[in-house]
Amino acid sequence: MFFQQIKVEGLGCFSYIIGCRQDGRAFVVDPKRDSDDYLSIADENGLTISGIIDTHVHADHISGAHELRAQTGAPIYVSEKADVDYEHEVLRDGDRFELGSVLIEVIYTPGHTPNSVTLAVSDKVRGVSPEMILTGDLLFVGSIGRPDLAGGELLDEQITNEYASLHEKLGKLPDLVEVYPAHGAGSLCGAGLSAKPSSTLGFERVTDPYFSFSFDQFKTELTRTTPVRPKNFSYIIAQNKTGPLLLKDLPAVDHFDYTALKMFVDEGKTLVDLRDAPSFGGAHIPGSINIGFSPQLANWFGMSIDPQEELALIASSKRESEDALAHLRRVGYDRIAGYCIGIADWIAQGEETGCLPQFSVHRLKSILEEDDRHCVIDVRTEQEWNAGHIKGARHVPIQEIIAHGLPLGKEDHISVICGSGYRSNIAGSLLKAQGYLRINSVIGGMNAWKMKYALEQ
């Protein structure tokens, strides 16, 4: 049996190639949108991609099934419960595929979505019992998939389905079966995912808390810990139901000179600055949002930016703009009109610039000692806040700022702090764009504060 896991950094997505070298065929499971990796792996191992399976209609990333079908002619398989509008083959509970020595059996396991399936994989050379399961977003390492993506009206039903899928459907399988999920740490499709790429069913039954809960506890915990729903999830689901555009059919992304950038800004369109916090803080185009280029770029874009808006990017280099474009197209940002490298031309033309002062923790400490009206807004998660915070700070998670802004005056003196300074710059830039005049971001964040000063808990 040939088996390989492919990881997408930042998104925490896992996809898989399963096949048999002697037979020459392979299936790809839960592919990312850009498909070169799968084609290269198949070619290097003498395999032909003969089938593509999505374990469910994905919410966090655009399916790469359509790209692969266009390049290989292989059919796309999805659950018979999936309400999709593109050409596909249906998967039913108990369906089996044989690729030489490899046997793949479909297990219908609703819960994360009403159309989720798990794939039980056997290597017939070693035995007919399943050696591994590809669990999609039902079961992760250390956690399980969020059940809310089908909509609030189906939440109770989905929680009931997820509990049954874990305990009854997977309950028929022995402890030694290996678990390969569609996501790991960094994914927004669940909470508390491990960084490990795989586990065993027996280990998860012992260590994953969701297996130890009664149904009532299970329901309470899932309702309590459901992560915030990013802005782009509904859009991605809609694209994956109808079939997204192929990458080759997307509009070209232009390099903006000063004139094109000026026109774009004057039209009031969305400008996202990918530069690091100090660069953005020193000078930026007024109204632009700072989401620094990092492995988490796509997730924070999903939280902050409507994917149906036309966008332009400010990058530090041509390579950064190209990498950002690949990351963002994986999560549905297809309306990126252009990019420019830095803002030197904007400054040279005498255009207005804004600044987001980057306060050190020393500067913040000094200000708090001198001015008791200065407000510190901590945008970290509840768990981070509870582990320790600055005395007198106000806890406003960044998701609340994205959705509602701040319940403070536009002229109040405010310093925004997070763990490292990354999220505080996102929040600070959003507040600046909303008209808050005296916003600062604490460089180094709580990591730096904890090195120097005491915390309140």
Image: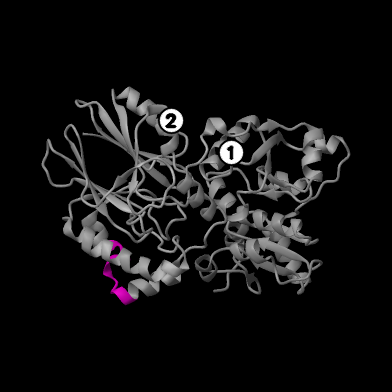
Q: Amino acid at mark 1?
A: Ala
Q: List the single residue furthest toward the right.
A: 350
Horizontal arrangement in the rendering, residue 315 relative to residue 348 (left or right): left
As measured in the structure, the alpha-carbon distance from the residue carrying label 1 to the one carrying label 2 is 24 Å
- Name the residue carrying label 2: 70
In the picture, the disc for residue 166 is none
User: Magenta part mainly helix, strand or loop?
Assistant: helix
Q: Which of the 4 quarters of the picture holds residue 364?
A: bottom right
Q: List the single residue furthest toward the bottom.
A: 216
- Of callouts 1 and 2, the N-terminal one: 2
| Label 2 Cα crowd, 10 Å radius (few <14 / some 14-19 / many 20+) | few
Q: Amino acid at mark 2?
A: Ala
**Residue 442 vertical placement versus 329 (above, below):** below
Q: Which residues are magenta?
A: 207-216
Dot 2: element: helix
- Magenta residue check for 140: no
Q: Is residue 197 visible?
A: no
Q: Quadrant of the N terminus?
A: top left
**Residue 354 vertical placement versus 259 (above, below):** below
- Name the residue carrying label 1: 324
Q: Which of the 4 quarters of the picture holds residue 363?
A: bottom right
Residue placed at 68% from the left, 37% from the top? 337
Q: Which of the 4 quarters of the picture holds residue 73?
A: top left
The x, y position of residue 167, in whole percent, is 24, 64
Dot 1: element: helix
